[in-house]
Image: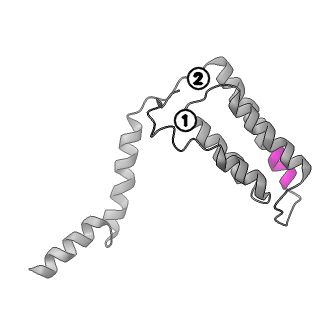
Amino acid sequence: MGLCAVSLAAAAAGCGGGAARHATPAATTATTEGLKPCRLTAPQRRAVAQVHADIERLRRIQEPLHKFSEMGTPAQEQVTGKVLLDLGRVKLPINVRSRLLAQAKSVTGLCGQCFQGLEAAEPVLAGRLGDSRCG
């Protein structure tokens, strides 16, 4: 009897069978599917497009690099600063801002201070402090 209860508790906690692991993403997806996407204003769309262009510049700058550097190249530092400025021009929805920062961080992996600057700009507390999801 006790062994059965332990195995049921382990399965409920996701410690065992594959069915428990596969059930979690479906529940998460169902919850997020119900959310309506945020409508961006024209200035917000322009800011997002500018940040995407900056991220592409960062990607091209980092392509030939092979070694990590704490300071990075001057071009990396300059474009990372431009990303942060472009993100700060207009108030973007939390999820859009987070996604853009994650994309920028993915292309600055070889520049320590660039990555840390982008990491510091993450809107971690915004959702917890009651900011609305769509800005």
Residues rendered magenta in the picture = 57-62
Amino acid type of disc 1?
Ile
Image height of 60 relative to 69, above or below: above
Q: Residue at x 50, y 28 (%)?
A: 134
Q: Could you tell whether 103 is left or right of 37 in the image?
A: right
Q: Residue at x 70, y 47 (%)?
A: 118
Instruction: Report whether residue 107 is seen.
Output: no
Residue depth check, mark 1 versus mark 2: number of the one nearer the observer: 1
Q: Which residue carries the number 2 mark? A: 40
Q: Which label is found at residue 94?
A: 1
**Quadrant hosting residue 91:** top right
Q: Residue at x 46, y 36 (%)?
A: 129
Image height of 92 relative to 9, above or below: above
Assess whether residue 119 is covered by the magenta stretch: no
| Residue found at the very far front of the displayed protein | 129
| Residue found at the very far left of the displayed protein | 1
